[in-house]
Amino acid sequence: MLACVVFAMLVLASVAALFYAQVLKREAPLLLRPQGATDTFQPAGTGIHPHEAHFDVRTSVDDVLDVSVLAASGRSIDVIARRLPIHKYQHKALAWNGRTTSGASAAPGVYTVAVRFERAGQTVVAPGFRLLLTGGSG
């Protein structure tokens, strides 16, 4: 009798695990932490290097990404990648030159990176990742 109860519990646990795996597949895409948790730089023309912030993005899903730089207000100031195809766990190297979409130098400050997943229809702000743009003019 005890063996039957244990067997039934194992079957139920297996079914629950399969169900939970399907739920996880439907959850929001995961932006894996970009490499280079804080990247400090100054824009070109300041005489100080580096002039760009370099980082990698990696996701847990196949998708097409739009990658934007956000000011502290949450407003997008530059789009550094449009319709970038990426495969699950593939690294994509990206860079931001400290300029806005219009080409003007961004103000010194801390910026974040937002990634829009086209297929999933969701946007994720890179967790714990910051770009620190220090003073200078371009």
Image (cartoon, helix red, strand yellow):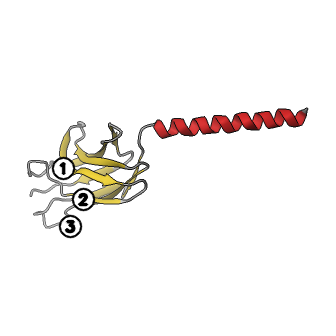
Q: Amino acid at mark 3?
A: His
Quarter containing the C terminus: bottom left
Residue type indicated by callout 2: Ala
- Tell me what residue is drawn at x 13 percent, y 48 percent: 101
Q: Quick one: which residue is furthest to the right in this view?
A: 1
Residue under the image location 18 percent in, 58 percent down: 97
Mark 1 or mark 2, which has the lower sequence index? Answer: 2
Q: CA distance from mark 3 to mark 1?
A: 15 Å
Q: Which residue is mark 1?
A: 108
Q: Nearer the viewer, mark 2 or mark 3?
A: 2
Tag 3: Cα neighbours inside 10 Å, few (<14), some, or many (≥20)? few
Q: In the rendered view of the protein, which quadrant contains the N terminus?
A: top right
Residue at the disc numbered 2: 95
**Which SS class for mark 2?**
strand
Residue type, mark 1 in image: Pro
Q: Position of residue 18 (x, y in %)?
A: 61, 39
Label 1: state its secondary structure: loop
